[in-house]
Amino acid sequence: MKLKPYSHLLFLSLFFRRGCWFLIFCAPLALAAESYPTHPIRLLVPAPPGGTVDLIARLMAPRLSEQMGKPIVVDNRSGAGGMIHAEMVANAPNDGYTIAMIYTSYTTSALLHANPTYSPLRDNSPLSQVSWAPLLLVAYPGLAAKTVGQLITLAKSQSLLYGSAGNGSGGHMAGELFNVMAHLSCVHVPYKGAAMATNEVVSGQVAYQFAGPVTVLSLAHAGRLRLLAATSLNRANAFADLPTLHESGVTGFDVTNWFGLVAPPRLPVALIQRLNKEIKIALTHPSVKTKLESEGSEIVASAPSNFADFIKADLKKWDKLLRLVPIKVD
């Protein structure tokens, strides 16, 4: 059959109209994702070596490296309240060769600084939430309060001090949320680090503190601190016998130390899916799972969309608090 003049143009029009754009424009991306990675991947960490977020990164890196067949190079970039790290994530190429740990301060720092240099909602591609752990509310053993309810009653009858690792720290934010939700006016005392604040609770210089399990749990077991509650909405497996503040009358109280992995913004969907899959596999490895659970953490391994929703909700929660309580960072 002889084709009419320009009939080939009609054929091409139908070809593209029926969704075959995919073959020309998307197929190369799919092939690239299939061969990915071809060289080492950098894992940015927003803290110096030794802290919890660094520990998680160094647990994950060898597992991801083994699974993906290329080195995962941990790159610690701390400073400026997490701004340096966040800017590097925002400006890195979206080719899958830069990924990054983020944690609780990723949302709070963007709100606490007058001129933040990044947006937690726009300047990343969420890959997966890795884990969360509650803070623990601990009090001076000599305090006349053995429950959260008794602490609230005491704080309404006299002025109490509470300590934290510094202005804008997780313990400070939790303390101010406690003030708002329990209708208290307890006074914050900032220290240079959680350990220093804990020492002051042990000695009775301040009445209580919100801090991570690693900081306070051994002292609580030794009787040098009184363990009152966990800050998560639901009980963590590691603290199944400890009531939450929500259960103790501060309805809806939910504060956790959370950790996750992101990539630079606008990462192709195929690479997001590949990295999410690898992260989930790594989190099932005994060397990762056992260590995180021994630290009191709950493993999440979420879908990228669920992690994006979590970041949005966390930002909204702290923005609401800061509209009520002006907190200034050091």
Image (cartoon, rainbow, N blue to C red):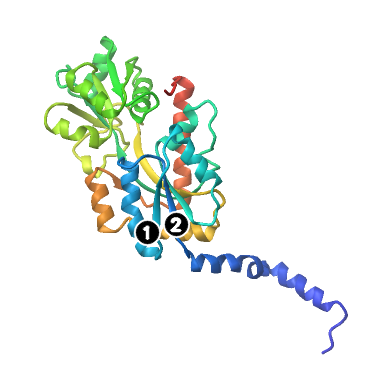
Taking 190 as reference, is 43 above or below it? below
* Number of marks: 2
- Residue 184: x and y in percent read 34, 16
Q: Nearer the viewer, residue 173 or 243?
A: 173
> Outermost residue, bottom direction?
1
Give the quadrant of the C terminus.
Answer: top left
- Mark carried by residue 307: none
Q: Amino acid at mark 2?
A: Ile
Q: Is residue 32 left or right of residue 148?
A: right
Residue 286 in the figure: left or right of residue 270: left
Q: Residue at x 34, y 24 (%)?
A: 175
**Residue tagged 1:** 64
Q: Who's the residue at 67% across and 67% down the image?
A: 21
CA–CA distance in space, label 2 to label 1: 10 Å
Q: Is residue 266 visible?
A: yes
Which image quadrant is residue 76 in? Answer: top left
Q: Nearer the viewer, residue 324 or 82?
A: 82
Percent of width and height locating residue 219 = 16, 31
Return the residue at label 2: 41
Callout 2: helix, strand or loop?
strand
Give neighbour class at mark 1: few <14, some 14-19, many 20+ (Cα, 10 Å): many
Residue 242 in the image: state x and y as whole percent: 20, 35
